Image: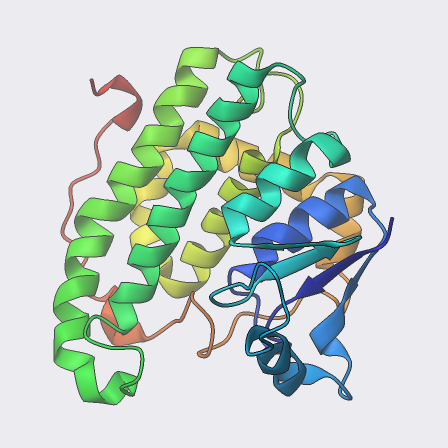
Amino acid sequence: MRYELYYQPSIQGRGEFVRLALEDAGADYIDVARDPAFGRPGIMKILEDPSVEHPSYAPPFLKAGKLMIGQTANILQYLGPRLGLVPKDQASRLWVHQLQLTVTDWVAEVGNTHHPIANALYYEEQKDEAKKRASFFTSQRIPKFFGYYEKILHKNGKATPYLLGKKICYADLSLFQMVEGLRYAFPRAMAKVAPTIPRAIALHDRVAARPRIKKYLASPRRLAFNTNGIFRHYPELDEQVNAKPVDLAQRG
């Protein structure tokens, strides 16, 4: 089956979490809006089409045969078994979905650092509020979210390189993307927290070295981060890094 991914054509955004799963599995898919003849207007046309049985609120959404599936975590929950990115038992699948939903919460907080008041306003119109939000996010939330995944990896032990053990799941690919995105958006904050999350950083490096992911990252299909996506680098938002590094893996 050829999957059709619908997402904004000029940013990584939430669609990138789906792309990474498709790329790692070597799935046959097309990034529909990358075609200039379709683009963002084509996405909006589908979103506003009253004949669509199960309309999405916003992209990304995935067309798989007759199915139209929206929401990143929901798409990955569907793709996981079909791409070999989750185990067969229900408990493990629910656990991976839980890990992905936590990433969803995290991504929302990232977006709130540069648009804490309203997405409809320009960054410059909420810059002071963004500085306050980013200061809390870099000093408190980045360590807390990474600490959660670090504790899971620590509990698994050194012999288990991924969140579920020896075999990769789609939540591993998403954790890789969080490291990538936050290194771009908040390089100073990430440099400070990195020594406290060695297992998460090692997982990132392991994912980056996977043959299909490595090839994808070097290809034009992998868009560069920019100031239109979720992960945005504004130097003034990365200035107030006050959190003292702690061994997050040892926290209860």
Q: Is residue 67 above or below residue 117?
A: above
In which image quadrant can residue 205 be found? top right
Q: Position of residue 50 (x, y in %)?
A: 58, 75
Query: Residue 3 or 155: which is nearer the viewer?
Result: 3
Residue at horizontal 47 percent and vertical 13 percent from the top:
156
Q: Position of residue 7 (x, y in %)?
A: 61, 69
Q: Quadrant of the C terminus?
A: top left
User: Could you tell me how many numbered marks the image carries?
Assistant: 0
Q: Position of residue 135 (x, y in %)?
A: 16, 60
In which image quadrant can residue 123 be found? bottom left
Residue at horizontal 73 percent and vertical 84 percent from the top:
38
Residue at horizontal 40 percent and vertical 71 percent from the top:
232
Q: Is residue 241 above or below residue 130?
A: above
Q: Would you say 130 lies left or right of 221 here? A: left
Let me know if residue 99 appears in the view.
yes
In which image quadrant can residue 59 be found? bottom right
Q: Would you say 38 lies left or right of 7 here? A: right
Q: Is residue 190 above or below residue 144?
A: below
Q: Position of residue 152 (x, y in %)?
A: 40, 21
Q: Would you say 58 lies left or right of 45 here? A: left
Residue at horizontal 75 percent and vertical 71 percent from the top:
32
Query: Residue 83 or 183: which is nearer the viewer?
Result: 83
Let me know if residue 188 appears in the view.
no
User: What color scheme is it?
Assistant: rainbow
Q: Would you say 20 lies left or right of 122 here? A: right
